[in-house]
Image (cartoon, rainbow, N blue to C red):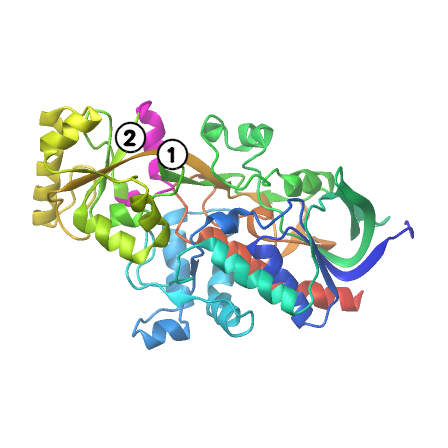
């Protein structure tokens, strides 16, 4: 076992995303000395690209709003969408701590969050998403980073972890860091928490584990290069849900911004190049991406002025898309057809079908029954959109304490993981098992759990 160390901390966190910063703050709160190393030069993980929405059950914010919820209902909602998978134990564990997590973020980590009551999003049977007022993950991250700075938790940007260091018994005792632009060093740690995202930007790993997404555009964080998978394989870790991922069906073209699925939930639809619908949009933004990919042509979000105005008033990023010309207006169906090259008769039939389905209250031929603000009415809005891979949902298996497990089920001493670096809770394969907020729940939730446990383990060591 080496004794040639350049620095020593109780808990070393690899990655400065939502999982990493929450883990660092929790470990620091527990009295541990903590350091965070981040390979990129700035905050740039998948948490930054999200809406900052964390689902939680039975929070005081829900109770104040008169919303009845509980962890069992939350877990049942997630499992109903995901189906059976390799990490069902985490679904229940995260549901149990979700209210404590959100209230800790607000009360102890000084994160600005409110309960979203304007929409529930796919999978949730009650309003339980909590997010920054702006609905931007970057504001969640800015608050976490500000709290780390205020509490003296060091975050070293541009300092990639390049390898884990183990002792002769296979326990993780530190990491090697540094690269072309930073000094190489060896950091001894009582515990290491992997919070370094998934493998969406590693094309070889995507082709290996999620082959149906290998040709899709990638819209996630550039740093998601699969270090946790590669290190985990070297250590004999167990893996779970490796073929699962989160996709998104509505990346504005050519603007590149995310068109919130609220546009669809409030009555919008997705149509193809002829102006025809081709699936049940209420499956959700992740599941519907596979339908779009099969179209092999341009697809469009079709909605109306009332949906545009409602959504822009609630979500800042969508309001910016509107301001920058990303929502093209057409006074009539004929105007829309002429502008986008739709077949006029097909588009009229689509609008008539929506009107009839909304009036009947019964599932339409695709199975959709919820039409939000009602049937679409003039003037109409169109945004060209496209599908993309957001982030992977599989990784090293962890237990309810966030400890990385070996294939025999035993914990690798000193190694924890969360967020994209760990197994997810969105089903075994594909994007249909993703429920809104699953990514940030496993990021912040496992960070919250692992930070405290890692601090205790480091003290015992």
Q: Residue furthest front?
A: 324
- Relative to residue 222, is residue 299 depicted above or below? above
Say which residue label 1 marks.
387
How far separated are the C-alphas under marks 1 and 2?
A: 9 Å
Image coordinates of residue 63 in percent, x first then y, are 35, 75
Residue 284 in view in this figure = no
Q: Which residues are magenta?
A: 282-297
Residue located at (29% from left, 39% from top): 325
Query: Of residues 306 and 425, which is closer to you in this image?
Result: 306
Left or right: where 183 falls relative to 260 = right
Q: Is residue 392 visible?
A: yes
Q: Nearer the viewer, residue 375 or 91?
A: 375
Q: Quadrant of the C terminus?
A: bottom right
Q: Secondary structure at mark 2?
A: strand
Q: Which residue is mark 2?
A: 299
Count residues near mark 1 (Cα–Cα under 10 Å), then give few for <14, some for 14-19, many for 20+: many
Residue 390, percent across and down?
47, 40
Instruction: Label 1: state its secondary structure.
Output: strand
When the figure is inspected, residue 384 is found, relative to residue 221, above or below; the finding is above
Callout 2: 10 Å neighbours few (<14), some, many (20+)? many
Instruction: Determine the main secondary structure of the stretch shown in magenta.
Output: helix
Sequence-first tag of 1 and 2: 2
């Amino acid at each position: 076992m080496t004794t040639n160390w350049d620095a020593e901390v109780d808990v070393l966190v690899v990655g400065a995303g939502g999982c990493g910063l929450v883990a660092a703050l929790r470990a620091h709160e527990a009295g541990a000395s903590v350091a965070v190393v981040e390979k990129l030069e700035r905050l740039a993980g998948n948490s930054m690209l999200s809406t900052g929405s964390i689902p939680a059950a039975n929070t005081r914010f829900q109770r104040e709003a008169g919303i009845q919820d509980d962890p069992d209902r939350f877990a049942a909602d997630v499992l109903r969408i995901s189906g059976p998978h390799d990490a069902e134990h985490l679904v229940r564990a995260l549901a149990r701590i979700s209210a404590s997590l959100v209230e800790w973020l607000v009360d102890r980590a000084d994160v600005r969050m409110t309960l979203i009551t304007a929409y529930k999003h796919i999978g949730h049977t009650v309003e339980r998403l909590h997010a920054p007022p702006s609905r931007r993950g970057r504001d969640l991250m800015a608050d976490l980073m500000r709290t780390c700075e205020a509490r003296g938790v060091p975050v070293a940007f541009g300092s990639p972890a390049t390898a884990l260091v183990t002792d002769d018994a296979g326990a993780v005792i530190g990491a090697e860091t540094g690269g072309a632009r930073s000094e190489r060093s060896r950091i001894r740690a009582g515990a290491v928490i992997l919070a370094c995202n998934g493998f969406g930007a590693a094309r070889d790993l995507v082709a290996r584990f999620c082959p149906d997404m290998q040709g899709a555009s990638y819209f996630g964080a550039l740093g998601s290069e699969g270090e946790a998978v590669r290190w985990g394989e070297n250590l004999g870790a167990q893996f779970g849900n490796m073929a699962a991922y989160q996709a998104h069906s509505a990346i504005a073209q050519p603007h590149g911004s995310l068109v919130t699925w609220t546009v669809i939930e409030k009555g919008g639809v997705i149509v193809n190049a002829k102006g025809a619908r081709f699936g049940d949009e209420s499956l959700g933004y992740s599941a519907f991406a596979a339908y779009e990919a099969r179209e092999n042509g341009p697809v469009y979000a079709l909605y109306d002025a009332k949906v545009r105005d409602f959504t822009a008033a609630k979500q800042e990023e969508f309001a910016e898309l509107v301001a920058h010309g990303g929502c093209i207006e057409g006074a009539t169906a004929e105007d829309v057809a002429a502008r986008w090259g739709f077949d006029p008769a097909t588009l009229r039939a689509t609008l008539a079908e929506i009107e009839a389905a909304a009036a009947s209250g019964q599932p339409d031929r695709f199975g959709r029954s919820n039409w939000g603000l009602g049937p679409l009415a003039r003037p109409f809005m169109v945004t060209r959109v496209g599908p993309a891979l957001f982030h992977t949902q599989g990784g090293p298996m962890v237990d309810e304490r966030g400890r990385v497990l070996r294939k025999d089920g035993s914990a690798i001493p000193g190694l924890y993981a969360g967020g994209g670096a760990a197994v997810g809770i969105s089903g075994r394969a594909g994007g249909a098992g993703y429920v809104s907020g699953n990514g940030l729940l496993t990021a912040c939730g496992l960070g919250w759990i692992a930070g405290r446990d890692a601090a205790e383990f480091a003290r015992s060591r």
